[in-house]
Image (tube, rainbow, N blue to C red):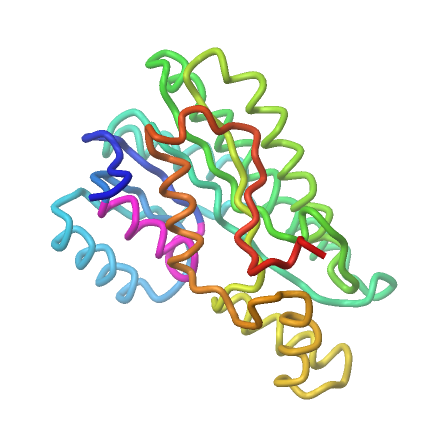
Amino acid sequence: MQNRIAAARIAVVTGSTSGIGLATVRALAGRGCDVMVNGFGDRAEIDRNCAEIAERTGNRIVYSAADLSRPEEVRAMMADAADRLGPVDILVNNAGVQHVAALHEFPDDKWDLLLAVNLSAAFHAIKAALPSMRERRWGRIVNTASVLGMVGAPHKPAYVAAKHGLIGLTKSVSIEVAPHGITCNAVCPGTVLTPIIERQIAQQAQVTGLPEDQVLQTVFLERMPTGRLIAPEEVASAIAFLCSDAAGSITGAALPVDGGYTTH
């Protein structure tokens, strides 16, 4: 397969029970990786997806229900992946949560939750993954940021702050690990058709008082020259490429997959 990743690579993809994360699991497994899936959702559906991917690709697909807002569970997940699959070669920090509210009404607990899941979890996972990557002198770390890690937006202070921080973390890590055969990059999706975006549209409609179809056009698609939502598989393909040997000289990048959003 094009951009096939070297055989026997072990990957952890957080927030991968739906949307971009699940598409990334499919992409990495299709390129020869054993993968640990992580996230919340209906357990029967998660098990079906894991079994289907394993059967189709012939790779091992396992699941962790770790709550990434808890650092101890992030560390336990990474140790569990190494125990069940082997030393982790590829880490995709994709987990994300969102809350939309005017700043003066933004709940303190939501601020703490968004920074914990969207930013701090990536730090703890990277910290856990690096020793074995450094020892084997090969590793790929990809952080799912957002176009809102590059520009601002109203009513999303915690998300914007966390995603800006995630790009900063990406750059810092990339410099530190480059001599050890490890790359660290971020992808910055625009509006992707995922459950989290569907919830955001409903939340923005509540905040602004606009109909949901108008919110979609004026809030989410107005700055995208392509004028359409992005498919999760498009972002997953970019992530899979960054995890391949062909991307070995790309590091510290924040790659927009945004329908032209950041060209404005």
Q: What is the x, y in percent for residue 105?
A: 83, 66
Asked whether 29 falls inside the magenta stretch, the response is yes
- Up-down relation of residue 229 to residue 236 (above or below): below
Where is the N terminus found, in terms of image quarters?
A: top left
Residue 13 lies in what quarter of the image? top left
Residue that appears at 57% across and 72% down:
227
Residue 33 lies in what quarter of the image? top left
- Closer to the camera, 46 or 71? 46
Where is the C terminus found, in terms of image quarters?
A: bottom right
Residue 201 lies in what quarter of the image? bottom right
Q: Is residue 141 left or right of residue 224?
A: left
- Closer to the camera, 83 or 19? 19
- Closer to the camera, 217 or 166? 217
Residue that appears at 77% across and 79% down:
208
Asked whether 85 falls inside the magenta stretch, the response is no
Q: What is the x, y in percent for residue 155?
A: 77, 64
Number of numbered callouts drawn: 0
Q: What is the x, y in percent for residue 83?
A: 26, 29
Which residue range is magenta in the image?
15-30
Residue that appears at 36% across and 42% down:
240
For this orientation, the residue located farthest to the bottom is 211
